[in-house]
Amino acid sequence: MKTLKIKRPHENFNKHCTYELFVGKNKIANLKNGEEKSIEIPTELENEQLYAKTHWCGSTKINISNIEPNSTISIIGSEFLNRRMPFIIGLFPVVGIIIFTGNSPLTKNIGIAVLVLLLVFLVGTLTIGRNKWLRVEARNS
């Protein structure tokens, strides 16, 4: 059996959400904000991949066989997606004001174009980029 030390630092974003840890398709643990655990991986799962999930989003996968014995694995939320993306979403009301209060057709067309770009960005982030919401990093102790 391989023992892994898994740590989740204190985060202001996602602080009320637990991160679920998986090895292959097997759920092995839940990590709360600021929690640290030592987890034993059965030998039959040592060739599988480790990843984390929260809601519908997750992380990239790392091979357990590539992790050195005295490593600490950190599960960290993506800085851009968790801290800065809400500010981008905050542009929706501003774009709405531009669209509905603009006097010229040019202003309204620019507002509609920005709205479409924001929607494409949002849908792309929530579908294509959903496995980049969290990061799994192995560091030597």
Image: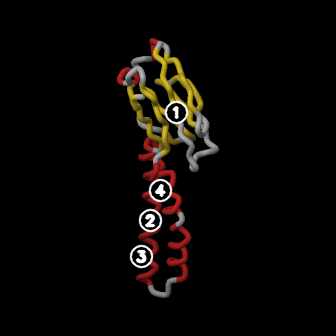
- Per the model, the C-alpha gap separating discs 2 and 3 is 10 Å
Circle 2 crowding by C-alpha within 10 Å: few under 14, some 14–19, many from 20: few
- Per the model, the C-alpha gap separating discs 2 and 1 is 39 Å
- Per the model, the C-alpha gap separating discs 4 and 2 is 10 Å
Q: Which residue is mark 2?
A: 116
- Per the model, the C-alpha gap separating discs 4 and 1 is 29 Å
Question: Which is nearer the eye, 70 or 86?
Answer: 70
Where is residue 39 drawn, in percent x and y? 53, 21
Nearest to viewer (mark 2 / mark 1) = 1
Q: Dot 2: what SS?
A: helix
- To which quarter of the image does residue 136 belong? top left
Q: Which residue is mark 1?
A: 7
Nearest to viewer (mark 4 / mark 1) = 1
* Residue drawn where x is 38% and y is 22% of the image: 68
Circle 1 crowding by C-alpha within 10 Å: few under 14, some 14–19, many from 20: many
Nearest to viewer (mark 1 / mark 3) = 1
Where is residue 48 drawn, in percent x and y? 42, 21
Where is residue 119 drawn, in percent x and y? 47, 60
Q: Amino acid at mark 4?
A: Leu
Q: Dot 3: what SS?
A: helix
Badge 4 or badge 3: first in the primary sequence: 3
Q: Amino acid at mark 3?
A: Ile
Q: Relative to 118, say whether 13 is above or below.
A: above
Residue 110's mark? 3
- To which quarter of the image does residue 135 belong? top left
Badge 4 or badge 1: first in the primary sequence: 1
Question: Which is nearer the eye, 140 or 51?
Answer: 140
Answer left or right for 18 relative to 126.
right
Nearest to viewer (mark 4 / mark 2) = 4
Q: Which residue is mark 4?
A: 122
